[in-house]
Amino acid sequence: MADLSRPQPYQPGAVSLFFVAKAGVFAAAFWIWLLVLVLRTDSATGQQVLAATGAITTTLVGVVLGARVALQHNAAIRHAEVKKLLVDISWNAFAAAGNAESTGKVVPFPTAPADGERVGQRGGGERVTVLDRGERTSGRDRRGNGERRH
C-alpha cells in the first residue's frame, strides 16, 4: 500500500496518454484500411500506398510517444526517490546535530586562497590544517581589517 503521508510523485498526465491512445487508434484505422484495400484489389493503387504510409507513420508516432510517457514515468519515480532521500538525509543531520552532547568545533568551509597565497609557495616543513588556519603565528591578517591575532 502506498504511504499516504508523503506526496505522490508527478505522473505523466492524461494529455500525454491521450496522444498515445489517439496515435494507436489512427494506426489501427490505417492498418484496417490497408488490409481491406489489399484484400479487395489485385494491383497496388495510390490508396494502398497512402494507407500503408499512414499505418507506418502513425504506428511509429504511437511507439515514440509511448516510449516518452514510459521514460517520463520512470524519471518521475526516480526524482521522487531522490527528493525523499534528500529530505531524510537533511532531517537525520538536523536531528543528529540537535542530539549532540558536546559542542564540537565547527570546521569552516574552505575558501579559495588569496592571490599571493599558493600551496606551492609554502615551505616543506610548514604544514597547516584547516583547523589551524586562524591560529598562525606569522601575524598575517586574513580578515583584511589590519588587526593581528594575539
Image: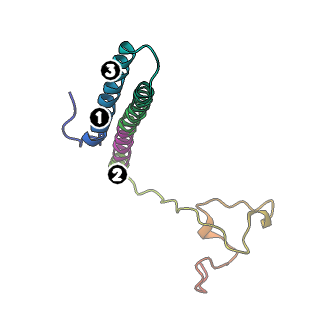
Q: Which numbered disc covers residue 94?
A: 2
Q: Closer to us: mark 2 or mark 3?
A: 3
Residue tagged 3: 32
Q: Nearer the viewer, residue 40 or 76?
A: 40
Which of the marked residues, 1 or 3, is nearer the chain's N terminus?
A: 1
> What is the secondary structure assignment of the residue under circle 3?
helix
Amino acid type, mark 2: Phe
Q: Closer to us: mark 1 or mark 3?
A: 3
Amino acid type, mark 1: Lys
Which of the marked residues, 2 or 3, is nearer the chain's N terminus?
A: 3
Q: Which numbered disc covers residue 55?
A: none
Q: Residue at x 29, y 34 (%)?
A: 22
Magenta stretch contains residue 50:
no
x and y percent of residue 62 in the render?
Answer: 38, 32
CB-based contact (under 8 Å), mark 1 and mark 2:
no
Q: Nearer the viewer, residue 4 or 100?
A: 4
Q: Which numbered disc covers residue 22?
A: 1
- The magenta stretch spans which residues? 76-90
Instruction: Please identify the residue farthest to the bottom as the structure is shown.
Output: 146
Q: Main secondary structure of the magenta part?
A: helix
Q: How much space separates mark 1 and mark 2, taking CA atoms? A: 50 Å
